Image (tube, helix red, strand yellow):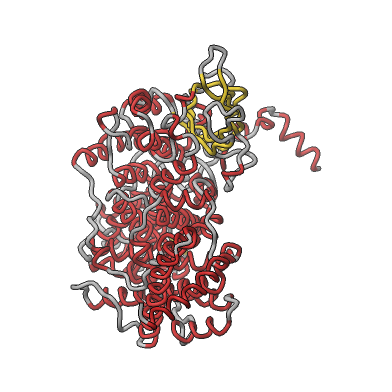
């Protein structure tokens, strides 16, 4: 070894000793979570110089002919059957014919291969089905998504024995068995490892080696109607009947709900939603060890199973529902803002309303872009743990903003509940999406950057593994690679920031408009990599406790991914010029957020000299991006106010059929108002005193006048809201004396 090499090795040894105390130690649950997922475009962003060709070469997600036929056939037929008002307020459940239809057409078996009786759909096809159903009914969408997400079906496919697959999968696919997954308990929510549910290895009355289960679960979707429960619990073997340790770890078993000792059937009412959800218990439930999912070899592997299933399912179900909610909100709000007039002007022409319309359009575009890109990665066989966490958290949060904007514009129309209100129930359901499959606060503060930094960083995981193995040679290679990477990234970030993002990786063939967007993302990717390294260097394992810093860096990584998805969608769609305002609005909003989060992180870092150096390099003039300009806002708003191919692309898949009233009436009114706009313009220019006056003066012929009257009637039908007899709303009002008695009390 040369003298330089010896000095470098001596220095590495000192750093090795320092790093042991500074870098975070992996717990068993963290290790399982890291091992369960793959990295992809998230790792490319962590390098600071993403190879855009890698993103653009990812195949555009598309449906097969069979998947498209299902979407336009059984799925559309199901949507026509759904009456969300009656499901939510009258029946509190899907009607029997809908349950039968779901089973007959194998909606519960989209992820199950055809050889096991399922549909064998791609992740993108599952997403498209859930998205379309979500535009009609949250209850129906949740009922379909759960068996195809974190349910026994997903785990059986990955870990089940051949006997378990042969028995359960055909029954699950055809709806003969209804699955639920029992994870959350009163003692353990986000901290699933704290569960007190347990299984004790023992022998049954006939000498069969098995386990005695005791549990209490709650918030279990489909639990009240489930026939088989995928149950997570801690397995113990106090008598060492299996010949190993006493504490065997979290395990998953398949529990038929008619097993003696299982208590099931009561219901929760989650945000007034009618999907089946409730608690269940088990008291001294005995099952043979064959009931362990995956057999005896999978005892203690439950946490790994759960993380693996979440890495895929979390990226499909709730992001699809969120994208549907944003698209539905955008389409209905644009239509309502066009037909609803105040002061003689469509309300969509007021700039305050246009701001909400623009945000709705951009959010719908971005969420669908992220959904498509994530499905493309999943369909390439990856388990995208970090990316799935990003899209689940940010899609559900942005769904809340989108629906809030839609409610603001509709005002009283969607404040008053009834069959004509097509947004009220969706508004109530939002907290469910934000809470389940990993609460968003936990995901933002601990998972996105916490796991992302370790899993996606080019060198950090190698350094940690070398420390764990006490391998100085491996640490030496990883550490000096890290140093070189850090220096290259720092100078790249400095050059890109000080040049106004004129340098950086850009895919070949990008036009001038797109080139600017790629360069800006390349600039912020390098800035993120620099700040992430400084945070890891100065805080080390203490970064776990600095959740605000971790959350901000997670937000930057999330924005980089979501904005990458926007550019990928624009490219996949053939670069339609009409969509450029949407791309510009998404980019301006996202980069403004990135600058604010980087600025706040640099203010919070404890090592002030390093923070100052980073600020000079990456934000020399501070956060200056103001977000979308007024022209972009107006352009995006206009996309929702006029019929066009761009509007249809943006809201594709929104199901506008179903029972009369609601969205169907709104669509009819929108078409009528657009079609009669020339006649309306003549009225304004002639300053006629109504339609009859215009006919008398020859401004309009009778045919045009009749169309205007029909349009006015259609608009009036949309603007109207529901009302009810007091006896329909309150049991107290059913006694005719009650109103009189109240009046007497007041007087």
316 left or right, relative to 729: left
Q: Determine the image quadrant of residue 105.
A: top left
- Report the front residue among 552 and 252: 252
Q: Residue furthest top?
A: 206
Against 639, is 493 above or below?
below
Residue 472: image x %, image y %?
A: 45, 66
Looking at the image, which is closer to me, 260 or 648?
260
Q: Which residue is drawn at 53% across and 44% down?
A: 417
Q: Quadrant of the N terminus?
A: bottom left
Between 466 and 13, which is closer to the camera in this rendering? 13
**Relative to 497, is 641 above or below?**
above
Residue 672 in view:
no
Q: Nearer the viewer, residue 712 or 650?
A: 650
Position of residue 421 measured from the top left corner of the image (x, y, whole percent): 47, 45
For residue 392, say whether it is visible.
yes
Give the image quarter of residue 196. top right
Query: What is the x, y in percent for residue 549?
Result: 55, 68
Position of the C terminus by quadrant: top right
Q: Position of residue 614 (x, y in %)?
A: 48, 82
Count the labels in the image: 0
Q: Which residue is drawn at 53% across and 33% down?
A: 244
Q: Is residue 459 left or right of residue 255?
A: left
The answer to whether residue 525 is above or below residue 705 is below
14 lies above or below 665: below
């Amino acid at each position: 070894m040369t003298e330089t090499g010896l000095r470098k090795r001596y220095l590495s040894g000192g750093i090795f000793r320092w790093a042991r105390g500074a870098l975070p130690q992996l717990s068993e649950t963290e290790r399982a979570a890291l091992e369960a997922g793959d990295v992809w475009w998230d790792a490319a962003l962590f390098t600071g110089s993403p190879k855009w060709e890698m993103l653009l070469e990812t195949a555009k997600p598309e449906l097969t002919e069979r998947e498209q036929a299902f979407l336009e056939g059984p799925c559309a037929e199901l949507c026509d059957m759904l009456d969300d008002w009656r499901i939510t307020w009258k029946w509190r459940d899907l009607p029997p014919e809908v349950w039968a239809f779901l089973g007959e057409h194998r909606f519960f078996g989209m992820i199950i291969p055809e050889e096991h009786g399922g549909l064998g759909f791609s992740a993108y096809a599952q997403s498209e089905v859930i998205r379309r159903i979500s535009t009609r009914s949250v209850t129906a969408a949740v009922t379909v998504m759960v068996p195809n997400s974190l349910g026994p079906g997903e785990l059986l496919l990955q870990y089940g024995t051949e006997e378990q697959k042969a028995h359960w999968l055909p029954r699950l696919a055809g709806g003969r068995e209804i699955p639920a997954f029992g994870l959350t308990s009163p003692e353990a929510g986000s901290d699933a490892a704290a569960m007190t549910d347990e299984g004790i290895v023992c022998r049954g009355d006939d000498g069969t080696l098995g386990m005695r289960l005791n549990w209490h679960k709650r918030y279990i979707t489909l639990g009240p109607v489930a026939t088989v429960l995928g149950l997570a619990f801690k397995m113990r073997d106090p008598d060492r009947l299996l010949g190993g340790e006493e504490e065997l770890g979290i395990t998953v078993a398949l529990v038929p709900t008619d097993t003696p000792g299982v208590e099931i059937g009561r219901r929760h009412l989650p945000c007034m939603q009618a999907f089946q959800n409730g608690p269940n218990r088990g008291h001294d439930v005995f099952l043979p060890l064959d009931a362990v999912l995956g057999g005896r070899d999978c005892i203690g592997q439950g946490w790994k199973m759960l993380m693996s299933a979440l890495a895929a399912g979390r990226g499909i179900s709730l992001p699809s529902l969120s994208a549907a909610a944003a698209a539905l909100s955008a389409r209905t709000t644009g239509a309502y803002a066009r037909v609803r007039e105040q002061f003689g002007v469509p309300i969509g022409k007021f700039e305050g309303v246009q701001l909400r319309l623009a945000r709705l359009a951009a959010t719908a575009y971005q969420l669908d872009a992220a959904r498509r890109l994530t499905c493309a990665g999943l369909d390439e066989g990856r388990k995208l743990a970090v990316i799935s966490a990003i899209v689940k958290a940010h899609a559900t949060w942005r769904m809340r903003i989108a629906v809030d904007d839609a409610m603001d514009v509709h005002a009283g129309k969607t404040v008053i509940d009834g069959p004509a209100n097509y947004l009220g129930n969706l508004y109530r359901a939002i907290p469910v999406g934000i809470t389940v499959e990993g609460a968003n606060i936990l995901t933002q503060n601990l998972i996105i950057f916490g796991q992302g930094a370790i899993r996606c960083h080019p060198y950090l995981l190698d350094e940690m593994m070398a420390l764990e193995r006490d391998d100085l040679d491996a640490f030496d290679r990883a550490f000096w690679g890290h140093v070189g990477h850090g220096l290259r990234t720092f100078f790249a970030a400095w050059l890109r920031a000080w040049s106004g993002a004129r340098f950086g990786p850009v895919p070949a063939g990008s036009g001038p408009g797109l080139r600017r967007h790629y360069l800006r993302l390349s600039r912020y990717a390098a800035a993120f990599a620099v700040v992430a390294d400084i945070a890891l260097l100065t805080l080390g394992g203490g970064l776990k406790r600095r959740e605000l810093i971790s959350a901000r860096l997670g937000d930057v990584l999330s924005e980089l991914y979501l904005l990458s998805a926007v550019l990928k969608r624009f490219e996949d769609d053939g670069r339609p010029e009409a969509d450029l305002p949407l791309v510009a609005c998404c980019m301006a909003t996202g980069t403004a957020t990135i600058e604010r989060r980087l600025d706040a992180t640099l203010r919070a870092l404890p090592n002030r000299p390093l923070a100052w150096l980073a600020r000079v390099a990456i934000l020399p003039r501070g956060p200056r991006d103001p977000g979308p300009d007024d022209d972009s806002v107006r352009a995006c708003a206009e996309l929702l106010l006029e019929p066009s191919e761009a509007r249809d692309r943006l809201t594709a898949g929104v199901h506008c059929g179903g029972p009369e009233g609601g969205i169907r009436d709104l669509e009819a009114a929108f078409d009528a108002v657009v079609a009669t706009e020339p006649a309306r313009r003549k009225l304004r220019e002639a300053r006629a005193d109504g339609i009859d006056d215009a006919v008398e003066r020859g401004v309009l012929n009778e045919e045009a006048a009749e169309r205007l009257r029909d349009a006015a009637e259609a608009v009036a039908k949309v603007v109207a809201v529901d009302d009810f007899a007091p006896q329909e709303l309150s049991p107290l009002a059913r006694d005719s004396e009650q109103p009189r008695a109240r009046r007497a009390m007041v007087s």
